[in-house]
Image (cartoon, helix red, strand yellow):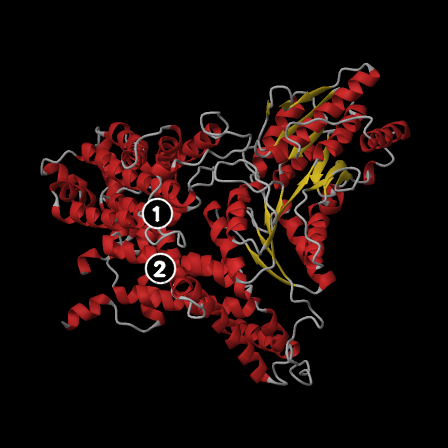
Amino acid sequence: MSEQQAPPPGAAAPVPTRSADPAEHTAGTGGRASQVLREVSTGSLGVTVLAFVLALVIGAVLIIAVDDDVAAAAGYLFARPADFFSAAWSAVADAYSALFRGAVINYRADDLAGVIHPLTETLTAATPLIIAALGVAVGFRAGLFNIGAQGQVIMGATVSGLVGFAWHLPVGIHLVVALLGGVVAGGLWAGIAGFLKARTGAHEVIVTIMLNYVALYLLQYLLTTSLFSTGNQPKSRSVDPSAQLPLLLGDQFRLNAGFLLAILAAVFVWWLMTRSTIGFRFRAVGSNAHAARTAGMSVTATFVLVMVVSGALAGLAGATQVLGTEKFLTDGIAGTLGFDAITVALLGRSKPLGIFLAGLLYGGLNVGGRVMEVSTGTPIDIVLVIQSLVVLFIAAPPLVRAVFRLPSPETKEVAA
Amino acid sequence: MKRATKVTALAALSTLALTACGSAPDEPSASGSAAAGSDFKACMVSDAGGFDDKSFNESGYNGLQDAKDELGIQVATAESQSNSDFAPNIDNLVQQDCNMIVTVGFLLATATGDAAKANPDVEFGIVDSTAQDADGNPVEMDNVKPISFDTAQAAYLAGYLAAGMSKTGTVATYGGLQIPSVTVFMDGFVDGVAKYDEDKGKDVKVLGWDKAKQNGSFAGTFDDQSAGQQLTQTFIDQGADIILPVAGPVGLGTLAAAKDAKDVSVIWVDSDGAATNPDAADLIMTSVMKQIGPAVDDVITGAANDKFDSTPYVGTLENEGVGLAPYHDFDSKVPQDLKDEVEKLKKDIIDGTITVESENAPK
């Protein structure tokens, strides 16, 4: 544990002094990045849970601050303090119970379908988040910051959608081809960044961010062409039923086979990173590119491959979005998916199981937040604040330990 | 340092004490909400712009609030964070027993169509569109009222006015995104300028939109003001002195560019720009107004009084759903002759002597 404590910033990474090879130069940055990532990912599950609790508490304070009834009762706090506290309590209890009812189980519903409806919505919302976050995590583990999940999701959705509505293939084959189209498109799009890094040393953060814009404007342009759009609105035709992901629980629920793909993707990434030779190479390059090169691995080829795998997963996320839930393309098809995926990957500590759970949590907060907004009038922005705070606290484990007076890991080690 | 903390704490405490000293209400009444109140519940879903977009979501929201204040009805709102929120947001509001749900923007057309089909008992209104089926074809439904605006009529007047006011003989317009509810303004503007040229034998040029080819300048966004500023600067460099930005908040970039330039003025859209941007009132000649708020208010009022019908509402000059705002600071600068001509045009459009044609106008 102690060896993973970050050294002082200045000494964080050996500065490559005589690097003629561009890849060698970037390996230095990769090393520093992975150090930060390792710092984030070594915290315990306990810290994650406590960070979540802390974020909920701060969220509660905000709910109290914006609630009208509480503000009214605060006006006569000293005359009748009980009013203030009961108003505050009921504001928070209403909001959080609505959040729970919206995200997990609606215990107030009349029938079974109504009771489990929120859960299916959470799984639906979590599906693309999990898949895209797995992609981001593969990059993290190999020391690459793939900030371009957004663009890769867009490219994946675009190609999947195009195959879905422009080609008319037999049932079964159509869906497979459409999904593959998304995977290949996302992989190639990210591969550009990997190739540029390997060949020229261009930093993947900058390249992937720029490619996000290219992808977005490309889609916006495509939506004005007659190939994509029928009317004069920037929205594509709907994908054929044969290319849509089948619904898992019937017409009542939006939950579709994309969720099964998310589970498969998580298993695949687990296998890839811990059981395969390629995954070993990824991790080796991630922890120390110099050592990996010395050991005879091709760092540049690994960069390209990592980005391709990472992008392919993001592309799959885009494919599930367009073939599963949305059914047609707009320029908002990716929403903020690509950026939320980065958060989920961090929250899940770049491990498949962690990401799966983090994706469920994040999806649940999104879905529950909407119910909270419509039933109690609490602004959905509070949910965004809670989500952000969870990640912020996780990124600063010492802060959480200080708040809850937990011993730091080193102390524990000494005691043991 | 320590003393400073103490002083601050004391100040904070006393503020709290002062504000919290009010007397308690006598009896906690059964419910704190508006006295009479109606059981009718009107709800609204925004598009991804949110209800604070200073544009059509906000106008729609204001209409909902007005209806609430006038009728004492219940309201609930759902703000969409992204396009994938539309369907679940509408669904959630249906679960909340909303009697009427107003959706804002054509992006919600498909989600509205689906929800209206699944919930025939709920009444829907959709701003700037009709309900659509999965393939984006408009569908007429008994429980959906489209609320749209023939803004080409008002923009036509603005085009005529701009042509008459331009000293350089060049005016310009641009849009946020190339969608019908935006290009309909630009179509009307171009035709208004053409009308002036025809009547007066002049040759005032319009930059930024070719009506015949349906192609022109777009910021590509409704929220990046710098994009609006750059586009406007380009137009000014090409000699334009009156600009019509049809891009919501992006138009603020145009105001910034116009402020830096000399003798450039702006025609605002949607709301009365001189009233909503008082700092820039000296730059805003007039505004092409699109009365979303009052229209939403009307439709909700109708539904609350059991008078819902699915006949499309189309805002026109005649029903004052669209119109030109007062000239405000420009009142003294616009020649009376031109004012009269604009007024005459308005009458001609209302009585059908002149038809403003736009393929993007609501049908």
Local SS, label 1: helix
Q: Residue beneath label 1, please?
A: A128
Local SS, label 2: helix
Residue A179 lies in what quarter of the image?
A: top left
The amino acid marked with disc number 2 is Leu
Residue closer to the observer: A406 or A174:
A174
**Position of residue B3 measured from the top left corner of the image (x, y, whole percent):** 53, 74
Residue B55 shows in the view: no
Task: Determine the residue positioned at 20% across, 44% down.
Answer: A286
The amino acid marked with disc number 1 is Pro
Q: How many marks?
A: 2
Position of B12 compared to A246: left or right?
right
Q: Chain of mark 1?
A: A
N-terminal of the two: label 2 or label 1? 1
Task: Determine the residue positioned at 20% across, 50% down.
Answer: A267
**Label drawn at residue A361:** 2
**Position of residue B330 measured from the top left corner of the image (x, y, whole percent):** 82, 36
Q: CA distance from mark 2 to mark 1?
A: 13 Å
**Position of residue B44 measured from the top left corner of the image (x, y, whole percent):** 59, 54
B301 to B138, vertically: above or below: below
**Position of residue A294 measured from the top left corner of the image (x, y, whole percent):** 11, 37
Position of B172 compared to A369: left or right?
right
Residue closer to the observer: A292 or A211:
A211
Residue A242 lies in what quarter of the image?
A: top left
Q: Chain of mark 2?
A: A
